[in-house]
Image: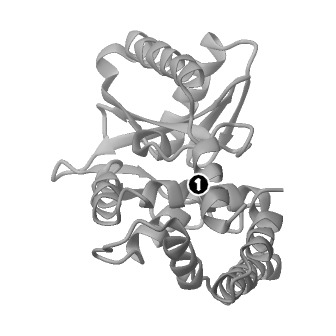
Amino acid sequence: MTVNSLLTNIASACILRNAKKVQIHASISYIKTNLKNHFQDNITGVIVFGSHSRNTILPREYDKCSDIDIMVIFKNPYHQPQTYLNQLKRFTESLYTQSQIKQSNPTVQLHMNHITFELVPAIRGLLGGLKIPAPSSNYINWIDTDPTGFNNNLIIANQNNSNLTKPLVRILKRWNAIAGYPYESYELEKQIVNNSPSYYTHNWLPKYFYDAVSSLDYSWLEAQWKKDKIEALKRATISAKQNEQGGNPYPAESDISKIIWV
């Protein structure tokens, strides 16, 4: 097997297939309906965002942390975030009595057998933009957000790069899961998209992969184990690229397989 065929197979395997899509879509529809019935006029909208909305979510067997992000927009903008988090927690406890539920600031997590939901409270700011709870380390209660703004950036990058950006995202998210999540999923997707070229004229997946890995960045303040995992990926891709250029496709494939597809 060559690096190209390996990466193509990984990207294909990490697509959420129809049967699971149907099950997840049914769960999304159910929770959205019950949110609206439960809160009625106290909420003004429910938005599905994150990797599911971008079609870059991985099946649970390839990423145990795969989840569905749902933003619940509350009508009253004057309460503190914890008030809305408490309301969302009571809602999930009343509806999903057999599921594991916990608050993980700034969300309420609902763990089901086939998927995890992350419920995020939001309010409208004075200028109409959306705000979500700030991280606990911040000195403010709410921060601005655009839940679907990144989606268009990913679509443009994918179109400009022979429709290979989304497969590349799935491949590197699979590595991220195996490596113990040195990156937050969203931050990894942003790095891939932000570092992608404005336009590529070829459709050879390994080229995108090598370039994306070489451009991965991290802060030197990160935990050492995270830096070690990222550097190990970079070394493996350098070795694979050198083996390919030297006419040794099978050692090149082995370099990548050992770190991404174990």
- Residue furthest left in the image: 127
Residue at 45 percent across and 54 percent down: it is 166
Q: Which secondary structure, mark 1?
A: helix
Q: Residues within 10 Å of mark 1 (few under 14, many from 20)?
A: some
| Amino acid residing under circle 1 | Thr
Give the answer, above or below, for where 250 lies relative to 174.
below
Q: Is residue 141 visible?
A: no
Q: Nearer the viewer, residue 128 or 11?
A: 11
Identify whether 109 is placed above or below 215. above
Q: Is residue 77 left or right of residue 194?
A: left
Q: Left or right? Give the position of 20 relative to 251.
A: left
Q: Nearer the viewer, residue 40 or 47?
A: 47
Q: Nearer the viewer, residue 105 or 163?
A: 163
Q: What residue is pinned by disc 1?
A: 8
| Side (left or right) of 33 relative to 198 | right
In the rendered image, the vertical position of residue 30 relative to residue 110, given as above or below: above
Quarter of the image where one finds residue 230: bottom right
User: From the image, which quarter does the C terminus lie in?
Assistant: bottom right
- Residue 95 at what x, y percent from top left? 61, 11
Q: Which quarter of the image is occupied by the N terminus?
A: bottom right
Coordinates of residue 142 in the picture (x, y in percent)? 41, 55
Q: Is residue 206 at least partly visible in the picture?
A: yes
Q: How is the image coloured?
A: one colour
Q: Residue at x 51, y 54 (%)?
A: 167
Residue 258, located in which quarter of the rendered image?
Answer: bottom right
Q: How many marks?
A: 1
Q: Is residue 259 left or right of 234 when viewed as pictured?
A: right
Q: Position of residue 234 (x, y in %)?
A: 69, 82
Which residue is the extreme one toward the front?
A: 247
